[in-house]
Image: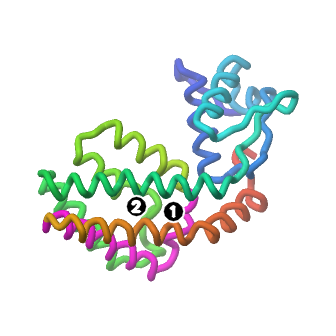
Amino acid sequence: MRKFRSPNLSTDVFSILKERIIRWEYAPGHRFTEESLCEEFGVSRSPVREALRMLVENKLVDKAPHKGYSVKQLDMQEIHELYDVRMALETFVIERLTQSDYPESEWKELYRTWQNLRKAEIADSPDFARMDEDFHERLAIWTDNRALLQQIRSIDERLHFIRMTDITTSQRLRETCEQHLRILDCIKEKDIDCARQALQNNIEDGRHNVEHAIKEALARAYLGPKAGA
């Protein structure tokens, strides 16, 4: 049983369940019961109900009459729509950066990071899914548009499982590094057409991996150990 000391118990429960769902530790259709969650987290029904409501609002869980709460079923159309929205938002980001100033010191730091990763071995490297997300979110931060950054982060959370099964070989790591460095070069050169094409190549490579990523994620969800077991 997990014990919380935080004054906001519902947020704690929500955050843990959200992370598990994003990482596919629960299979699509997995049912939650208030009783089991209360027992696992050592809390009353009130924060559990609030956490489940928040998961429904975030479109991670469905609530059906007489059936309770279950992890949202996979929707391929929705995934491709998320890629479309991601492409639109991030195209705006790089267009803005090619037409305005950006923090040069942070640009250099980000460039060095991906130069070094290009030389790395996949087994000795960190969580590339998070690093890939950080790269794109860092660019959004440079626009000073908080609403834009929030939308990109929300989409990144929904697509995290694809990134987790994407950069898993040295070849994919090198390709991703080259694409990220190209995007940064285009931004520095203030070449908007170059930047658009570099970004499109990077995002479409991830989209092409969707079916493979889903198969891998489903295998983990159905065959792997369940979180909290």
Evaluate if marks 1 and 2 touch, with contact meaning CB atoms under 8 Å apart.
yes
| Residue 162 painted magenta | yes
Identified at 48% across, 56% down, the residue is 84
- Residue 121's label in the rendered image is none
Percent across and percent down for residue 118 are 33, 77
Residue at the spot of label 1 = 163
How far apart marks 1 and 2 lie (CA) works out to: 8 Å
Q: Is residue 181 magenta?
A: yes
Q: Main secondary structure of the magenta part?
A: helix
Residue 19, given in percent of the width and then of the height, sits at 58, 44
Which picture quadrant has residue 120?
A: bottom left
Asked which secondary structure carries label 2, the reply is: helix
Q: Amino acid type of disc 2?
A: Asp
Q: Which mark is residue 132?
A: 2
Residues shaded magenta: 161-189
Residue 71: quarter of image: top right
Using the image, determine if residue 6 lies above or below residue 196.
above
Position of residue 202 relative to residue 60, above or below, is: below
Classify residue 70 as left or right of residue 95.
right
